Image: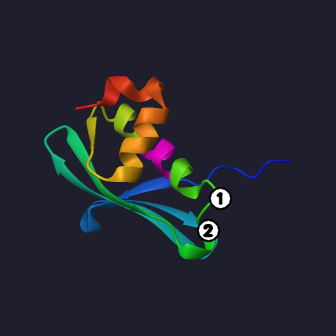
Amino acid sequence: MNEPSPTVRDNVELSRYEMDIGSDVAFARYRREGATVTINHVETPAALRGQGVASRLMGGILETIRHNDEKVVAACSFARAYLADHPEHDDLRG
């Protein structure tokens, strides 16, 4: 049986989206201007790199952005690459 996907939460105080993976936290720092969220940096704990954690984080972030009727700007290389590989999110580009 598959484990449920970790939940992405918006930590407004730290301006970052977070996702708990066990005792670790993957996160993406952002800047919000009106209804546009600029993703500045995506970070995954070293022990979890190469396991798709950052991709799951980005997927959850984009679901949240869509739900909030916001747009996204990818300022970091990982976020840009993720959006390039997932054209189903093209409508979210700000």
In screen coordinates, is 18 left or right of 34?
right
In the image, residue 78 lies in the stretch drawn in magenta: no
In the image, residue 58 lies in the stretch drawn in magenta: yes
Q: Quadrant of residue 65?
A: top left
Q: How is the image coloured?
A: rainbow
The residue shown at (58%, 65%) is 49
Labelled pair 2, 1 in contact (Cβ < 8 Å): yes
The residue shown at (31%, 53%) is 76
Which quarter of the rendering shows the C terminus?
top left
- Mark 1 belongs to which amino acid? Gln
Measuring from the top left, give residue 90's x and y in whole percent.
37, 25
Q: Specify the segment rendered in magenta.
A: 57-61
Q: Which residue is mark 1?
A: 51
The residue shown at (34%, 23%) is 91
Q: Quadrant of residue 14?
A: bottom left
Q: Secondary structure at mark 1?
A: loop
The residue shown at (45%, 42%) is 82
* In the rendered image, the vertical position of residue 66 relative to residue 75, given as above or below: above
In screen coordinates, is 20 left or right of 36?
right
Residue lying at the far right of the rendered structure:
1
Q: Which residue is mark 2?
A: 48
In screen coordinates, is 37 left or right of 5?
left
Q: How many marks?
A: 2
- Mark 2 belongs to which amino acid? Leu
In screen coordinates, is 30 left or right of 80?
left
Measuring from the top left, give residue 57's x and y in whole percent.
50, 52
Q: Secondary structure at mark 2?
A: helix
Report crowding for label 1: few under 14, some 14 to 19, many 20 or more residues within 10 A (C-alpha): few
Measuring from the top left, give residue 46's x and y in whole percent.
55, 74
